[in-house]
Amino acid sequence: MTDIFSLAFTPNQVFSASGSSAIKVYSTNNPEFPLAQTLEKAHKLGCHHLAVSKDGRVAASVGFGGEVNVWTLQDGLWAEEGKIVGAISMSYHCQRFQKLR
């Protein structure tokens, strides 16, 4: 088992990030909070931050490798929309994403 570093909430789901390379997505429509989806190999070295847009259709995750992944909800499932990689500070990207929400 790994530590949980970040949680993010949509109207119907909870994202969970840990030292694992996968991001877990749980449904909040059921009181047992079943696992709805696993975003396998989301971040090679694990994920430390998550953010979700106000409408719950776009998410961003930040990995220990310095990359930011952008996810979109497509037909009820989350899919990677793209990556942000480079020398610019990851905190800058997170702050910018927060403003876009």
Image (tube, helix red, strand yellow):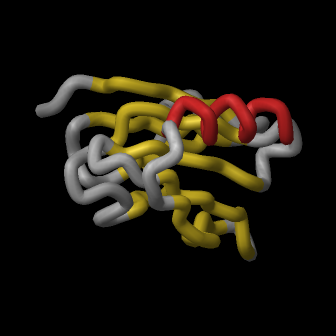
- Closest to the observer: 68 or 37? 68
Q: Position of residue 34 (x, y in %)?
A: 46, 43
Point out the image quarter for the C terminus. Answer: top right
Q: Position of residue 39 (x, y in %)?
A: 41, 61
Q: Is residue 3 left or right of residue 82?
A: left
Q: Tag count in the figure? A: 0
- Closest to the observer: 29 or 101? 101
**Which quadrant would residue 97 be assigned to in this image?**
top right
Residue in view at x 62 percent, y 41 percent: 93
Image: 7 above or below 11: above
Q: Position of residue 92 (x, y in %)?
A: 61, 34
Image: 71 above or below 96: below
Residue 21 shows up from this direction = yes
Image: 84 above or below 3: below
Residue in view at x 50 percent, y 38 percent: 89
Q: Is residue 76 left or right of residue 26?
A: right
Point out the image quarter for the N terminus. Answer: top left
**Which quadrant would residue 11 be assigned to in this image?**
top right
Q: Is residue 84 left or right of residue 40?
A: right
Residue 29 shows up from this direction = no
**Which quadrant would residue 9 be assigned to in this image?**
top right
Residue in view at x 33 percent, y 65 percent: 40
Residue in view at x 29 percent, y 42 percent: 64
